[in-house]
Image (cartoon, rainbow, N blue to C red):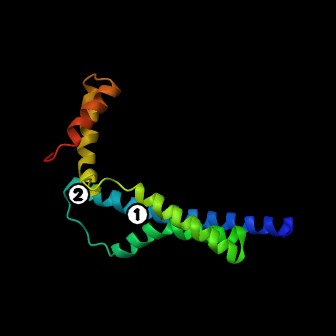
Amino acid sequence: MTAGFVVHRLGIAVCLAVVALWLVSAVTARVRTRAAARRTTALLGAGPRPCPQVLGSALKDAVAVWAGPAGALLAGWVLVGGVTGVVVGGLAAFGVRRWRARVRPPAGTDPREAERQLPFAADLLAACLAAGAGPVEAAEVVGGVAGRPGR
């Protein structure tokens, strides 16, 4: 393998990574904009306007689970090449899949409940800071109260 060939493969891998990051950031920005609009609508008391689903939740979950391992497999194939690259990428994909399985949040946490409590926690933090509490004390109070059920 010549040095030019390796540089070419590395350039292709970097370009693919940049395109993938751009796509992820564009989708993330759209999702955040829509979520902010939903929260604003909920806070102002206006009725929610119907919003068509762009991707089904099952498809989103599948993409979230398999994007990392697929990227690792693709990187191994592009960087190493051939059957060896597929094997190296497959091993990397297996490692990424196991690593992501360990990083999941605990089973008792509900992200929707945390999202629902976020505006109240921000208000409580602002009230504590306005009352003269230091940032550390205010954060401790909010952290102690926010985790309780029924709030």
Q: Dot 2 surroundings within 10 Å: few (below 14), some, or many (20 or more)?
A: few
Give amino acid for label 1.
Answer: Val
Numbered badge on residue 31: 1
User: Disc 2 marks which residue?
Assistant: 42
The x, y position of residue 52, in whole percent, is 32, 76
Q: Is residue 95 visible?
A: yes
Asked if the residue under mark 1 is in contact with the one under mark 2, i.e. CB atoms within 8 Å, the reply is no
The x, y position of residue 139, in whole percent, is 31, 32
| Left or right of 118 on screen, residue 45 | left
The CA distance from mark 2 to mark 1 is: 16 Å
- Residue found farthest to the left: 150
Question: For the point 47% across and 70% down, which residue is it?
Answer: 66
Identify which residue, 31 or 114, lies in the foreground.
Answer: 114
Q: Looking at the image, is mark 2 or mark 1 earlier in the sequence?
A: 1
| Left or right of 116 on screen, residue 12 | right
Question: For the point 26% across and 57% down, which residue is it?
Answer: 112
The x, y position of residue 101, in whole percent, is 41, 60
Identify which residue, 126 or 60, lies in the foreground.
Answer: 60
